[in-house]
Structures are given as C-alpha cells and as structure tokens.
Image (cartoon, helix red, strand yellow):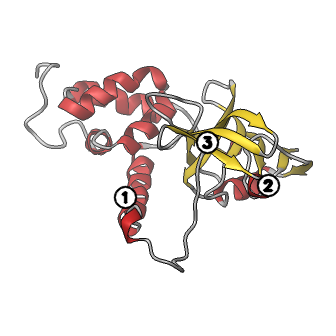
C-alpha cells in the first residue's frame, strides 16, 4: 500500500483510525486531538478537515500518538465526547431577534461582551467583541449591573472540585480562569464558557482576547489554579 493514498478496505488499520477519521470532520474533534498532541498539528488537521488528505498510515500514527500518553482520553473517549457535543448542539437552537418585530411589553435581555476603550465620569466607551462595533453605556447604575472578568472584591479558597463546579455553572458571564496547559505552562484566559464538561473533564471556553483565528480553548478542570467570576476570585488550595 502506498502511504499517500487512503485504503479502499474499511477498517484495515483498526477502529482507532476510523474513529479519528470521523473526529477530524468536525472542529470539536480537531480541538480534542490538539489538546492531546499539541497545537502544532492543528494546521495539518484543518487541511484534512477540508480535503481529507491524510493517508490511513498517517492516521494510524496519529492514533498511536493519541493513545500512548497515560491518563489522556483514548480515541473511543473522543468518539463518546463528540457524540455528547453533537447531542447538545442538536438540542439547542438559537435565532437572533428581528428588530422590526419587537413590540411594547416584550421581555428581553441584552448581553454584550465588550472591552473598555475609555472610562469617563458616569460613562464607559466600549467595543462590542461580537458585533465588532463601538458603543457607550451611560450612568453608574447601568454600569454597576454589568459583570467583569477582571474586577473582584473577595478571595475565597476552594477545592479543585468546587472550582470545576463554579466554572461549568458560569454561563452568560465573563470570567478569567488560570490553568495548566498540556505542556505544564500556566495560561490565563479571559472569556466565556461555551460547552461545559463533567467535573473531571475539559470545558470549552472562548478566549475573547484573541482578535482573529481560533478562539476556542479546552480548560482541564484538574489543573485550574484560580477563577474570577461574579466579583470573586476563587483560589484552588
């Protein structure tokens, strides 16, 4: 068999290769594999996602790399987690509000993720991170109803389990989380929770300091050092 061609016989390299081939068809699958093998492989995987250009031999090698690190999810775990993500995606659908259809007495919520450009007395000049536009907020009462990923007024020591519980329940609010990357380096991420995982899993968090390219990061609950959310800094003891 030539290494630069895909096999015509399904499953010849075993179930791990078949699982990885399916995983590489989605961004969630690429994220999970990069979590284990390092970000350096992301460009190659994205190319496979577009062209399915990796041979079965290359996929077999990748399956071996994913499998050898003790304590890391195996390809079958990737398959299970992808199914969980797919189920979540299909259960919840969102449509934006049509401005012309808003009526008097409609109940609405306005949630904007923004960076502060300038502070003035009773006013903030902001940049909307989703709509890529500037806007202002007038009045301290409105400002004090907001949430911050940076400002905190209390420090509380918690267990790793409690820190994980706080992270996965922090929907619709900005947060800062400090955790260890796969290479042992500490990372401080400011962003928002996208997809929570069970207590000993890895939640998907969007890094809102990234201005272009890939924003999604997987935060390993077991390596959380501290979490800032709702005006409190939770420090893992």
Q: Residue sitting at 57 percent across and 36 percent down?
A: 70
Labels 3 and 2: the sequence-earlier one: 3
Cα distance, mark 1 to mark 2? Answer: 37 Å
Specify the quadrant of the image occupied by residue 142: bottom right
Direction from residue 161 to residue 13 in the image, left or right: left
Q: Are marks 3 and 2 in contact (CB under 8 Å)?
A: no
Image coordinates of residue 180 in percent, x first then y, are 68, 32
Q: Residue at x 38, y 37 (%)?
A: 30
Total number of numbered discs in the rendering: 3
Q: Are marks 1 and 2 in contact (CB under 8 Å)?
A: no
Sequence-wise, the earlier of marks 1 and 2 is 1
Residue at image mark 2: 144
Which residue does the image show at 58% across and 66% down from the upper left?
109
Nearest the eye: 33 or 13: 33
Q: Position of residue 56 (x, y in %)?
A: 21, 30
Q: Which residue is denoted by mark 1 in the rendering?
A: 86
Q: Which mark is residue 114?
A: 3
């Amino acid at each position: 068999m030539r290494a630069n061609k895909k096999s015509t016989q399904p499953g010849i390299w075993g179930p791990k290769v078949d699982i990885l081939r399916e995983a590489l068809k989605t961004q969630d699958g690429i994220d999970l594999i990069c979590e284990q093998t390092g970000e350096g492989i992301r460009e190659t995987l994205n190319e496979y996602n577009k062209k399915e250009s990796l041979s079965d031999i290359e996929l077999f090698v990748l399956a071996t790399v994913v499998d050898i690190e003790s304590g890391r999810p195996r390809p079958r775990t990737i398959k299970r987690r992808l199914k969980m993500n797919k189920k979540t995606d299909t259960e919840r659908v969102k449509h934006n509000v049509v401005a012309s259809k808003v009526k008097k007495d409609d109940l609405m919520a306005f949630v904007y993720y923004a960076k502060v450009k300038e502070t003035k007395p009773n006013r903030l000049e902001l940049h909307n991170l989703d709509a890529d536009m500037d806007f202002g907020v007038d009045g301290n009462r409105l400002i004090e109803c907001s949430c911050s990923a940076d400002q905190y007024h209390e420090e509380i020591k918690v267990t790793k389990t409690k820190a994980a519980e706080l992270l996965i329940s922090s929907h619709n609010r900005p947060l800062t989380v400090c955790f260890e990357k796969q290479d042992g380096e500490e990372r401080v991420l400011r962003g928002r929770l996208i997809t929570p995982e069970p207590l000993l899993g890895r939640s998907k968090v969007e890094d809102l300091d990234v201005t272009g390219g890939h924003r999604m990061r997987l935060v390993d609950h077991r390596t959380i050092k501290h979490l800032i959310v709702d005006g409190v800094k939770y420090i893992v003891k």
